[in-house]
Image (cartoon, rainbow, N blue to C red):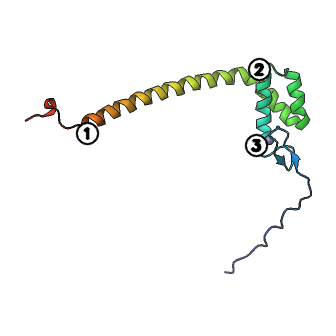
Amino acid sequence: MTAKTTAPAAPAKKSTEPTPCLCGCGENSKGKFRPGHDARHCSNLAKKVEAKELTRAKALAEAGKASDALRNKLATMLDNQGKRFKEKGDKAVARAQAKAAKAVARAQAKAAKAAAAAPSSPENVSA
Ligand SMILES: [Zn+2]
């Protein structure tokens, strides 16, 4: 068996000039967006619509500058926005409750530890 060594891939030619990422992060990208930043751009636009900084039409037009796919994605996002925010709110409540429960548990554990570490008090001593 001879190990087949494949030639290393040729270094990517810098044929495309880096362009600033369209999401506005200020970083350069090889295409329109850095990886994952199309989604970021999309949610930024959705947030602006939610905050009434942009109209839905303007946000869609903005997303459309990048690609039709992104525009469609934003449209879906805007359609689901109300629902999404509600879920997010519910999650936040659940998280706050979990945090509070944890704090209580921690306080109890601390108290128990302190009690265990404390030199035996008269009432703990049993013959
Ligand atoms: Zn970006």
Q: Quadrant of residue 105?
A: top left
**Whole-percent x and y of residue 11?**
83, 65
**Mark 2 near mark 3, Cβ–Cβ under 8 Å?**
no
Quadrant that contains the N terminus: bottom right
- Residue on which the image places disc 3: 36
Which residue is at a point 74% across and 75% down the rendered structure image? 5
Asked if 23 appears above or below 16 in the picture, the reply is above
Q: Nearer the viewer, residue 76 or 14?
A: 14
- Residue on which the image places disc 2: 51
Asked if 36 appears above or below 59 in the picture, the reply is below
Whether the residue carrying mark 2 lies under 8 Å from ligand 1 is answered with no
Q: Is residue 96 left or right of residue 9?
A: left
Outermost residue on the bottom side: it is 2
Secondary structure of the residue carrying numbered label 3: loop
Which of disc 2 and disc 1 is earlier in sequence? 2
Outermost residue on the left side: it is 127
Which of disc 3 and disc 1 is earlier in sequence? 3
Q: Is residue 104 left or right of residue 89?
A: left
Asked if 6 appears above or below 100 in the picture, the reply is below
**Whole-percent x and y of residue 16?**
91, 54
Q: Nearer the viewer, residue 88 or 124?
A: 124
Quadrant that contains the C terminus: top left
Secondary structure of the residue carrying numbered label 2: loop
Q: Is residue 30 left or right of residue 98?
A: right
- Residue on which the image places disc 1: 117
Measure how far apart labels 1 and 2 are at the Cα level. Answer: 54 Å
Q: Amino acid at mark 2?
A: Ala
Q: Amino acid at mark 1?
A: Ala
Which residue is at a point 89% across and 47% down the rendered structure image? 19
Q: Amino acid at mark 3?
A: Gly
Q: Is residue 68 left or right of residue 117?
A: right
